[in-house]
Amino acid sequence: MEISCTFDILLSTISSFVPILICSALLLWFFLQWRPRHPRDKRLPPGSMGWPYIGETLELYSQNPNSFFSIRQKRYGNIFKTHILGCPCVMISSPEAAKIVLVSQAHLFKPTYPPSKEKMIGPEALFFHQGAYHSRLKKLVQASFVPSALRGSVPDIEKIVLGFLPTWDGSTVNALQEMKRYAFDVAMISAFGESLELEMEGIKELYRCLEKGYNSMPLDLPGTLFRRAIKARKLLNETLRKLIQQKRESSTSIQGGGGGGGGLLGALLGAKDQKLNHLTDSQIADNIIGVIFAAHDTTASVLTWVLKYLHDNGHLLEAVTREQEEIRGRIVEANRGLTWDDTRSMPLTSRVIQETLRRASILSFTFREAVQDVELEGYFIPKGWKVLPLFRTIHHSEDFFPEPHRFDPSRFEVPPRPNTYMPFGNGVHSCPGSALATFEGNLDGLKNMA
């Protein structure tokens, strides 16, 4: 009896410790999985990795992101490590390091996005690739947005702006939402090379749903924005595939890109590789969606900031208005529409856009991933770590832009130092539609001032 009681007590004691032992083992395994692995003779950048798995994500989202980066830059220097969104990361804020990651050794740092974002846009979009496929696609996209291609789009884009202005007269408008409407219609012209009035509203509605899900938590559950966005993405894909098929079957095959030439869709349909293979429907659809995504939200944000900075700087508003009125006078006198050459005759307006791109820095940073163990500025970066060039930090550096928080377009009367001004990124993965974005800003400025 006594032995039996002793055994029961021992069994009870052991049983009570089992959950603790299991939890301890799990925590040890979790820590070993999270803990960065690197050779003992290699030195990681300074910085804090925060809590296991969570890292410093809570700090990033609970304070101004600018403060998060600037505090760590002051504490650790222009290159430091952290752990955010479940990933070990290295932040860099020197032009020299940014050039290495984006240009001179870009092959060592592949572009990377969260899987949920890739699913929304489409895995065949050029954003997610490197090498020959990326190079081929970027040339096709750039061909649709070079000045020679955009020239023919001027009347169509002018018509879009003129259609918006009467709807604003005497009413209060949400500037960002109006700029999104404008940027979306311009993106459609750029993508398809023509007005698609029958399909436009359907595509626009599906894209709105897709956009809401893109910036939501990636929870694929009934009733969530993400689930609705996934459904919208499938319907959008079907709509685009029908358009692609119609174009393929059309007896008047459209060649090339740009205004009147079928836009980006025409360029993608006519493209062949060295083996004379055409792009598949899914490749074309993903890249059309990708270009609309890239041309829509960021452009609308920049245009909204342009309006805000001009509103806040009355002397600049007056000067820009005079510049635009002079061009408008020439157009009226010649009894003609706006031309490409007119949009090139706006030096002050162009500098206002440049300074807006610097000051607002819509593209605050970009994600890259080390494809192998890399040494950068004397520090070791393990394979698989994310590397983030901090464009906003560089744009707001006193060393490159005196009084960086002052809105001063005159600073662009002299070209900035190389690799200190990167509103569209840099290197092989820089934005291929930068010319269109700047053109939109110039044209929108002209019509708004008029």
Image: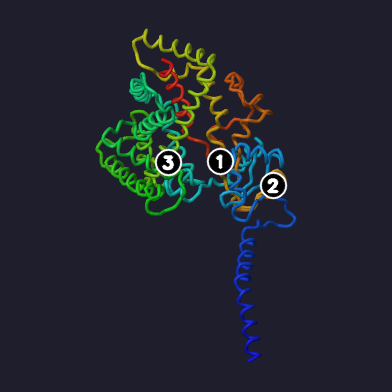
Q: Nearer the viewer, residue 437 or 149?
A: 437
Residue beneath disc 3: 290
Q: Quadrant of residue 151?
A: top left
Give the residue type that dot 2 points to: Gly
Residue 120 in view in this figure: yes
x then y, percent, for residue 344: 47, 19
Q: Residue furthest top?
A: 333
Residue 185 sits in quarter: top left
| Type of the residue with mark 1 | Thr
Vertical position of residue 337 compared to residue 181: above or below: above
According to the picture, the residue beneath numbered tag 1 turns out to be 366
Residue shown at 64% from the left, 86% from the top: 7
**Mark pair 2, 1: CA separation:** 19 Å
Front in this rendered view, residue 5 or 92: 5
Is 195 drawn above or below residue 213 in the view shown? above
According to the picture, the residue beneath numbered tag 2 turns out to be 47
Where in the figure is residue 217, as x and y percent of width and height?
A: 47, 48
Instruction: Indicate whether 196 appears above or below 156.
Output: below
Q: Amino acid at mark 3?
A: Gly
